[in-house]
Amino acid sequence: MELQWPLILFTTFVVWSAGLFGAQGAAALAGEGRRAQMPALVASAALLAVGGVAVFFHLEHWERIFNGFGNPTSGITQELACIVAVGVLMVVAFVMLRRGASDGAGGKVGVAGGSAAAAASKAANAGAPALPKWLAALMIVAAALLVLVTGHSYMMAARPAWDSVLGPLSLLGAACAAGPLTFAVIEVTRDEVVGRAIALFSLIGSIANLAVSVSYLAFMEMASASYTDVGYYYDPTHPTAGMVDVTALAPFAGESVAMVAVAVVATAVPVACAIVGRKTGNWKVWGAVGALCAVVGAVALRMAFYSVGASVYLFY
C-alpha cells in the first residue's frame, strides 16, 4: 500500500496535540507547571489545527467530507466528535486561564530538584492561574479518547496488519511520550522547574511507547503470514496495477526494514532522554530531543503501518 502522507501527518499531529493536552491536565492535577499552561494550550491547539489542515490534502473533493458525518458509527464521525470535544475543552481552559480562575491554587508543587529549586518554582507559580481539577481530569480523558478513537478507525479485518488493538495503543504510547516531554520543555522555557509528576510521566510514557511500538511491529510481522503467494493473478478492479509482492508485506523485509529500524531507535531515545532529564534537570535539551524523537518514531511506525497494510481482497 502506498504511503498516505496526509493521513500520516494528520495522525501524528493529532496524537502530539492530544499528548500535550493530556500532559497539561496531568500537570494541573499535580499542581505543577501553572505558568506553562497557556503556552502549552496554544501549542496544543496549533498542532491540532495543523493536523486538521493536513487531512484535507488526502481528499480529492474535500467538500464531500461532510457526507460521512451522517453515520454516528463511522470512524470519521467519531474522530470529529472527539476533536470537537477537545476543542471545546481547549476553549474552556483558555477562558479559565485568562480569567485567572483556579481550583486549589497555592497547592504544593512537586519538583525534581533541591529545596531551593522547589522554592523558586513555588514563587514562579504564585501569581499564575491554575486550572480546576475537574477540567484537568476531563482534559486527560478527552485526549486519551481522541487518540484511541483515531487509532480504532483503522482497525479492519480486511487488512490483517491493522486489525489489532495494538494499533490504537501505539498511538496512545506516542502521545504519552511526546506530550509530557514537550510540556517539560515549555516549563523550562517559562523559567519553571519541571515537576515530579511530569518528569515521571515522561519516563513512564516513553517506556510504554517503546514497549507498545515494538509489540505492534511484532504483530505486523505475524500478520504477514495471513497472505499466501498465489503466483500470477488478475484483479478486475485494478487491471493495470502490478501484482503485490507478498514477501514485502512483512515489516522486517524489503523497504520496510529501514522504517522499522528508525521507529525502534526513535522510540528508544525518549526513554534515555527522560532518564537523563530527571538526573540532570536539563529538560530544555533532553526534553526537546526526546519529544522530537518520539514524533519521528511515530511517523516511522505509521510509514511501516501503511507499507504492510495490504488488503486480503487483493487475492480474490
Image (cartoon, rainbow, N blue to C red):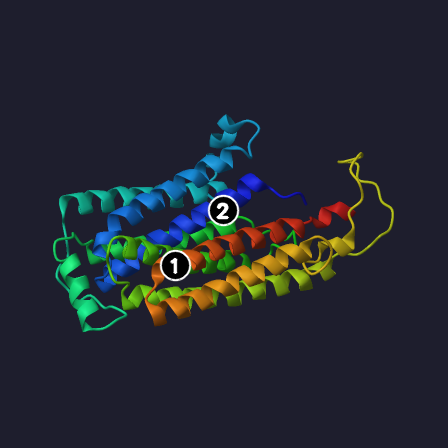
Side (left or right) of 14 relative to 155: left
Classify mark 2: helix, strand or loop: helix
What's the residue type where badge 2 is placed? Answer: Thr
Task: Report x, y in % for residue 283.
Answer: 35, 61
Where, by quadrant of the figure, is residue 81 drawn? Answer: top left
What residue would you read off at disc 2?
11
Label 2: few (<14), some (14–19) or many (≥20) C-alpha neighbours in 10 Å: many
* Residue drawn at x 43%, y 60% as measured from the top left: 177
Is residue 79 visible in the rendered image? The answer is yes
Labelled disc at residue 285: 1
Quarter of the image with the N terminus in it: top right
Measured as percent of width and height from the top left, residue 291 is found at 43, 56
Percent x, y for residue 149?
A: 46, 51
Q: Which residue is drawn at 44% across and 38% down?
A: 52
Select label 1 or label 2 by which is in front: 1
Residue at 87% of width from left, 51% of height from top?
A: 231
